[in-house]
Image (tube, rainbow, N blue to C red):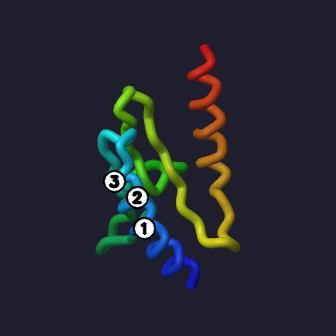
Amino acid sequence: MHLQLDGAALCEVLKALKAHPAVSWCERMNSGAARVGGRFIRFGFVGCPDVLGMLRDGRLLGVEVKAAKSVLNNQFIENQDSSANAAKD
C-alpha cells in the first residue's frame, strides 16, 4: 500500500519540480536491488533520494518522497548530513 502512495506522490512531486522556475532539471532515481537469474544486481546507490536534479543556480537537488507513515532510510539521512556539512566548508 505504501509503495502505491509513494508512487502517486512521486509523480506529483516530479510534475511540480519540472514546472518550477528554479529547477534546471530533475529525474526519478530508481534504486534498490533484485535477483536476476543467478545474479544479485543493485540499482542506484544506498541512500539515493527518489529525485535528483539541479537548481538553476547550480545547487544539487535531492528529494525523498514518502507516504505519511513511511520512514526515511538511515543511509539517506547520513548522506543528507554529509552534504550539509560539505556545503558549510
Binning the other alpha carbons within 10 Å of mark 1 as few (below 14), some (14 to 19) or many (20 upward) gives: few
Query: Which quadrant holds residue 2?
Result: bottom right
- Rendered position, 5 above or below 42: below
Q: Which residue is mark 3?
A: 19
Provide residue 67's location: percent of width, then percent of height: 60, 71
**Type of amino acid at the residue the image marks with label 1:** Glu
Q: Helix, strand, or loop for circle 1?
A: helix
Taking 27 as reference, is 4 left or right? right
**Mark with earlier residue (3, 1):** 1
**Type of amino acid at the residue the image marks with label 2:** Ala
Nearer to me, 8 or 73? 8
* CB under 8 Å between discs 3 and 2: yes
Tell me, yes or no, if residue 42 can be seen here: no
Marks 3 and 1, how far apart in space? Answer: 11 Å
Taking 45 as reference, is 73 left or right? right
Provide residue 25's location: percent of width, then percent of height: 30, 44
Q: Which residue is mark 1?
A: 12
* Disc number lying in front (3 or 1): 3
Q: Which residue is mark 2?
A: 16
Query: Which quadrant holds residue 69?
Result: bottom right
Marks 1 and 2, how far apart in space? Answer: 6 Å
Residue that appears at 45% across and 73% down = 7
